[in-house]
Amino acid sequence: MFNRKLKSMLIIILILCISLVSSPNLVQAAGTNGWKASGSNWYYYVNGKMKTNSWVQGSSKLWYYMGSNGVMKTNSWVQDSTSKTWYYLGSTGAMKTGWVYLGNKWYYLYSNGAMAASKWILYGGKYYYLNASGDMAVNTKTPDNYYVGSTGAWDGKAATTSNTASSTTNTTTTNTSSTTKVFQVISIN
């Protein structure tokens, strides 16, 4: 009888130990810091508490986003709830910057990772227009009536519009000055 009770208790203890080890949400030992892997998922802890719904800067100075379940996001878009700005996280989970090609479309992400949208950017000496959804406009007229070709670069010609020449000139000046003020020239390495 004693052996049967002991055996039952040992089985229960073993089951509890296995469930604790396999569930990172339950294992939060005081003083646990940094990255922890569980299967193919990565988690980040600070003072034994798992980070959730937040950005984490790794030792390499790259940024990562931890989802509501604490799992590091990969290959996905994340929208900042306050600014409504979009960021893209690559296959390693690191926040991407620069040009990113996804789903047969190009997107531009500033050096802080924020996606450019509804804007002109100057890149490599050429102007490109990013649509409201963030994808680069190609082979089309932009909302301000400039034409961009198959590479997405502005063709260099004045806007085509039914407005008078003076209003077309004003539009060109406005776009150039806002682009100059807002964006920096970025060269390809």
Image (tube, rainbow, N blue to C red):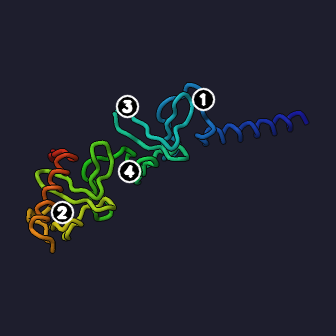
Gap between marks 1 and 4, in whole Å? 35 Å
- Label 2 vs label 4, nearer the camera: 4
Identify residue for label 1. 29
| Element on which disc 4 rests | loop
Looking at the image, which residue is at 52% across and 33% down? 45
Looking at the image, which residue is at 50% across and 47% down? 67
- Label 3 vs label 4, nearer the camera: 4
40 or 138: nearer the eye? 138
Looking at the image, tell me whether mark 1 or mark 2 is earlier in sequence order. 1
Gap between marks 1 and 2, in whole Å? 52 Å
Location of residue 95 with respect to 28 vertically, above or below: below
Amino acid type of the residue tagged 2 in the rendering: Gly
Looking at the image, tell me whether mark 1 or mark 4 is earlier in sequence order. 1
79 or 27: nearer the eye? 79
Residue 83 x, y percent position in the rendering: 41, 48
Amino acid type of the residue tagged 1 in the rendering: Ala
Residue found farthest to the top: 31
Query: Can the viewer see residue 181 in this picture?
Result: yes
Amino acid type of the residue tagged 4 in the rendering: Thr
| Quarter of the rendering occupied by the N terminus | top right
Identify residue for label 3. 59
Mark linked to residue 152: 2
| Element on which disc 2 rests | loop
Q: Are marks 3 and 1 in contact (CB under 8 Å)?
A: no
Residue 9 x, y percent position in the rendering: 80, 36
- Label 1 vs label 4, nearer the camera: 4
Looking at the image, tell me whether mark 2 or mark 3 is earlier in sequence order. 3
27 or 96: nearer the eye? 96
Identify residue for label 4. 85
